[in-house]
């Protein structure tokens, strides 16, 4: 359901589409606003106060249930006309630009996300972070910036949060003070309210991008180097199992989307996510998403259940958006039983830490497997670990590409194939460095060659390393 319909979802459809004349307008009333302005208090009215009062008067005059059945452009026209009429009646001194801005804000309050709507429409913003009603922060190009966006108070912020969660059939209150949800456009939302958040409600929105970045885009951004595109493509097409590791906002999902673009379109891919973010373009893609419990605490479906079910759906590859719990054991078993070429991500600080975390997640399944047996499963299932990091200049870079080469005793052995070496910071604060090969020829090179990918030895020589 479009956002502008959220407010009036309960409207009953009529036999014919109504027109502007079908939206009943109550008779104009003499409002306290006009009395105050006549008393000489016009200069004391803040923009937020004006908007709130106009919003309230608008709701008094319009029948929103009829607006629900009208075209969006017609709704905008009707509401804009009423707002202009109210401004004239209240003798509020606004110029044309201020009036149009007020109309837009009122529309956002009724059908959108209030003060956040302009931020949602800004393509340069990737994250919107509401740190209490009086402070809204956004992320652009990996860096955080303060904005002048404000809510009136906690109640105003809660109205927007309620609108978001109710639109997806969820609720947030004292008994359920945390919510993860997804907006109709695919953006991911997290909200947390008192008593869990001490200073008031908090809202975080990770915006969904329609344009999927390509491998060439990552090269231009400095995430990877151009020679590595052939290597990454060869690994995916040769069906190596790849684990992408990194911190929050390091670009794991972006790289996962890029790697998945190298999967042949003839293969059947099943994606499993906690909150759907992947944007695979292959025609034979099946998307699965977990489900939280309903208000009675029933009906939850976790990632492990989806991984088990996916194995019954004849997948060529399984892509787990982020492995975070007991589903790790089922994913590893799938990788070891004919579903090679699978991809996943997890939060970790290094390739070694990523494998250790994977081992911990397997233990969460309570299967009481010996440590060595678990490590053997990991060593045989995972072929490549790619480590990503976000640097102080906001750029996301691949800092390590390591290959799992087997076991030595009870320890999983890794060898670095590529690494990022930071050489300093320039006067603008940009990190100076380059991704370079370590000089080690990967063990998987023979498998790549068997699949028709003969990579030059110079790719793995530091003498021919490309700068990032």
Image (cartoon, rainbow, N blue to C red):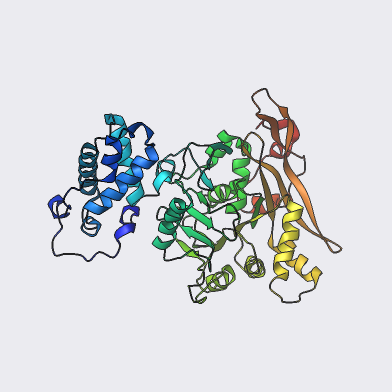
Quadrant position of the N terminus in the picture: bottom left
198 to the left or right of 173 = right
Vertical placement of residue 369 versus 413, above or below:
below
Where in the figure is residue 238, as x and y percent of width and height? 61, 54
**Which is more toward the observer, 334 or 174?**
174
Q: Position of residue 248 (x, y in %)?
A: 62, 49
User: Measuring 72% from the left and 56% from the top, which residue is drawn there?
Assistant: 354
1, above or below 126, in the image: below
Residue drawn at x 42%, y 44% as measured from the top left: 115
**Quadrant occupied by the C terminus:** top right
Where residue 87 appears, as percent x and y from the top left, is 24, 38
Q: Which residue reaches farthest top?
A: 427
Q: Is residue 463 above or below residue 187?
A: above
Question: In the picture shown, does residue 47 fall above or below 163?
Answer: above
User: Which residue reaches farthest right?
Assistant: 409
Residue 381 in the image: state x and y as whole percent.
Answer: 69, 63
Q: Is residue 186 visible?
A: no
- Residue 161 as seen in the image, left or right of residue 417: left
Q: Residue furthest front?
A: 39
Res. 462 in view = yes
Asked if residue 204 lies left or right of residue 223, the reply is: left
Q: Nearer the viewer, residue 315 or 468?
A: 468
């Amino acid at each position: 359901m479009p956002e502008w319909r959220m407010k009036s979802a309960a409207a009953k459809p009529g036999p014919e589409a109504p027109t502007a004349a079908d939206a009943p307008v109550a008779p104009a009333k003499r409002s306290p606003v006009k009395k105050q302005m006549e008393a000489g208090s016009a200069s004391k009215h803040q923009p937020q106060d004006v908007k709130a009062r106009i919003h309230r008067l608008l709701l008094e005059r319009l029948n929103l249930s009829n607006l629900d059945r009208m075209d969006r452009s017609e709704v905008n026209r009707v509401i804009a006309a009423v707002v202009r009429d109210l401004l004239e009646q209240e003798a509020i001194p606004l110029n044309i630009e201020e009036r149009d801005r007020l109309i837009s804000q009122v529309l956002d309050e009724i059908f959108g996300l209030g003060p956040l709507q302009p931020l949602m429409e800004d393509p340069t913003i990737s994250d919107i972070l509401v740190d209490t009603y009086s402070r809204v922060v956004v992320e652009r190009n990996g860096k955080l910036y303060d904005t002048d966006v404000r809510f009136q108070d906690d109640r105003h912020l809660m109205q927007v949060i309620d609108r978001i969660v109710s639109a997806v059939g969820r609720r947030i209150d004292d008994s359920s003070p945390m919510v993860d949800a997804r907006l109709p456009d695919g953006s991911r939302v997290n909200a947390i309210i008192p008593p869990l958040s001490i200073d008031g409600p908090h809202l975080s929105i990770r915006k969904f991008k329609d344009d999927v970045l390509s491998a060439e885009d990552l090269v231009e951004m400095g995430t990877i180097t151009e020679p590595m595109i052939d290597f990454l493509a060869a690994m995916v097409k040769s069906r190596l199992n790849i684990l992408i590791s990194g911190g929050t906002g390091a670009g794991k999902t972006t790289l996962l989307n890029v790697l998945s673009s190298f999967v042949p379109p003839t293969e059947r891919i099943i994606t499993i996510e906690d909150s759907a973010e992947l944007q695979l373009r292959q025609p034979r893609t099946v998307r699965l998403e977990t489900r939280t419990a309903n208000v009675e605490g029933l009906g939850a479906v976790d990632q492990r259940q989806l991984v088990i079910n996916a194995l019954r759906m004849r997948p060529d590859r399984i892509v787990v958006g982020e492995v975070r719990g007991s589903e790790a054991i089922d994913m590893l078993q799938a990788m070891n039983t004919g579903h090679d070429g699978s991809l996943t991500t997890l939060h970790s600080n290094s390739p070694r830490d990523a494998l250790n975390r994977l081992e911990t997640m397997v233990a969460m399944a309570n299967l009481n497997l010996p440590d060595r047996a678990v490590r053997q499963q990991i060593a045989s299932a995972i072929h490549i670990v790619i480590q990503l990091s976000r640097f102080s200049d906001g750029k996301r870079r691949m800092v390590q590409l390591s290959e799992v080469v087997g076991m030595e005793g009870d320890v999983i052995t890794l060898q670095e194939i590529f690494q990022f070496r930071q050489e300093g910071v320039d006067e603008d604060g940009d990190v100076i460095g380059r991704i370079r090969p370590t000089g080690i020829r990967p063990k998987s090179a023979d498998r790549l060659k068997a699949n028709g990918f003969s990579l030059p030895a110079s790719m793995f020589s530091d003498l021919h390393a490309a700068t990032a």
